[in-house]
């Protein structure tokens, strides 16, 4: 009988390890701005959320009036997109976060200045 309990304990230990490993291996998906989408004033949306490298951000917006540009810290802080910066323009774009800092802005005139930008640090 004692041997049977030992097997059960080992099996439970293996299952627990698998559950922990699987939980950390799956990326989370986030819609930027939640139900309101990528919009003016969205800059505070990441607050209180924890992001990991490999998580996917979905940017939903009206492509006639907005875009998404991947920028560095300076581009985010100063609302500047440089030549050659990746620009997303479909209205339903997905971006996989890299480890570290990730910055996004809208390059339409004044939109970034009106808070259409986000900064995310992925663990």
Image (cartoon, rainbow, N blue to C red):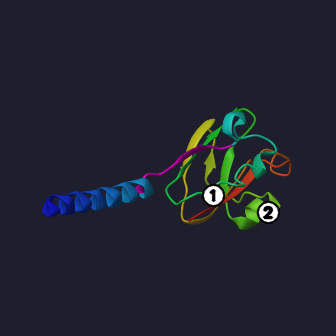
Which residue is the site of mark 1?
84
Q: Report which quarter residue 77 is drawn in.
A: bottom right
Please provide the residue range marked out in magenta: 25-32
Distance of mark 2 from mark 1, alpha carbons?
18 Å
Quarter holding the C terminus?
bottom right
Q: Report which quarter residue 100 is drawn in.
A: bottom right
Which residue is nearer to you in this view: 102 or 106?
A: 102
Q: Residue at x 55, y 56 (%)?
A: 97
Residue 33 drawn at (x, y percent): 70, 42
Is residue 111 found inside the magenta-colored segment of the image? Answer: no
- Element class at badge 1: loop
Which residue is the site of mark 2?
77
- Packing grade of label 1 (10 A; few <14, some 14-19, many >=20) is few
Counting residues from the N terminus, which is met first, the one under dot 2 or under dot 1? 2
Quarter holding the N terminus?
bottom left
- Element class at badge 2: helix
- Left or right of residue 47: residue 18: left
Query: Please, is residue 57 above or below residue 71 in the view?
Result: above
Residue 82 drawn at (x, y percent): 71, 60
Kindly identify which numbered label has been placed on residue 50: none
- Left or right of residue 68: residue 44: right
Q: Residue at x 72, y 66 (%)?
A: 73
């Amino acid at each position: 009988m004692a041997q049977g309990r030992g097997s059960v304990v080992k099996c439970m230990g293996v299952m627990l390890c698998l559950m922990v490993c699987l939980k950390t291996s799956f990326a989370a998906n986030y819609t930027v701005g939640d139900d309101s989408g990528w919009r003016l004033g969205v800059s505070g949306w990441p607050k209180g959320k924890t992001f990991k490298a490999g998580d996917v951000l979905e940017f939903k917006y009206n492509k006639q009036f907005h875009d998404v540009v991947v920028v560095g810290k300076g581009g985010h802080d100063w609302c500047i997109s440089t030549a050659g910066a990746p620009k997303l323009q479909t209205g339903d774009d997905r971006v996989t976060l890299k480890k570290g800092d990730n910055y996004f802005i809208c390059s339409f005139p004044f939109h970034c200045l009106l808070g259409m930008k986000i900064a995310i640090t992925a663990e």
